[in-house]
Amino acid sequence: MKLTQEIIAAKRDGAELPEADIRQIIAGISDGAVSEGQAAAFAMAVFFRDMSARERVALTLAMRDSGTVLNWDDLPGPALDKHSTGGVGDTVSLPLAAVVAACGGYVPMISGRGLGHTGGTLDKLDAVPGYVTQPDNDLFRKVVRTVGCAIIGQTADLAPADKRLYAIRDVTATVEAIPLITASILSKKLAAGLHGLAMDVKFGSGAFLPDPAKARALADALVGVANGAGLPTTALLTDMDEPLASAAGNALEVAYALDHLTGKRREPRFHAVTVALGVEMLLLGRLATDID
């Protein structure tokens, strides 16, 4: 076993870390053996030195294995999910989960809070009085099985290493590090035991990755790592040069999502993204055979 600072120094100097080193530092982040300062230094080293495809898969799997991994093989249909990198007015998850459930899929969505200026799905759901974002596992499974979908937050035993590293990234200017974004998103999705994942990677002035080239690089990384880790995944690139819907603010966005689902209001951009992601999820779950 190496000293934590030796692993950090190796990545700082541009070395490709072996899987054992990656698992060691992630285990330390999870159990507290790695200090916050060391975790921040590791994140910054990755930010500047990047990671190879092999390192990214190893990092993602190590973060997944830091906690419980769910299994949905007892469901009568595929467990599917989507993830958006976030933007202004993006509450697509709410109507999308219901639509996919109505088509025979099951959506056990484990979501997160906002990074940077983009609000997370959990932040939006906190605007709903009485909504429980962290139920116990039995209740989560019961709701998914009976309703077809549930959106919850990351529990303490699900990818705990990511939960700690996620908070550190937000305050150390390492949010944009593609290997860390990739591992953060996919460790939770892999821990959720999914059968298919559709990614919505946003670019433009309202996205946290405004540059289309960087957004494409992230999309390529997500698809490559997810499939390399055994999770069938596709990605769409969508623009965030203007709000996705005519509402900004958690409570207002939730109200709009309900209006959209019931047909009271349907903004064309919001609707197009919802339908496109729904198609990808149904194809991944083999609930549809083609885009038509």
Image: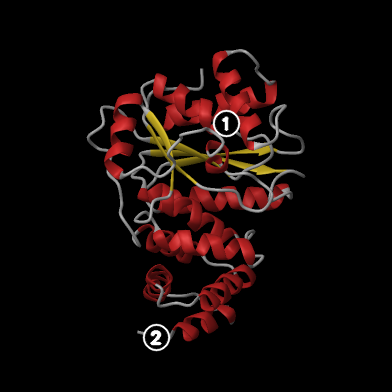
The single residue placed furthest to the front in the displayed view is: 129
Q: Residue at x 69, y 39 (%)?
A: 88
Q: Which numbered disc, 2 or 1, marks the residue closer to the eye?
A: 1
Q: Is residue 56 visible?
A: no
Of 210 and 218, nearer the camera is 210
Q: Which residue is mark 2?
A: 2
Residue occupying image coordinates x 52% and y 80%: 8
Percent x, y of residue 149: 39, 30
Q: Position of residue 142 (x, y in %)?
A: 28, 33
Left or right side of 122 for 110: left
- Compare marks 2 and 1 and give the one earlier in the sequence: 2
- In the rendered image, residue 11, in percent from the top left (x then y), is placed at 54, 78
Q: What residue is shown at x 58% (from left), y 47% (from top)?
A: 219
Which numbered tag is attached to residue 92? Answer: 1
Task: Locate residue 127 relative to residue 214 in the image: left or right.
Answer: left
Note whether 102 is above or below 163 in the view shown.
above
Kind of residue indicated by mark 1: Val
Dot 2 falls on a residue whose secondary structure is loop
Q: Nearer the viewer, residue 27 or 153?
A: 153
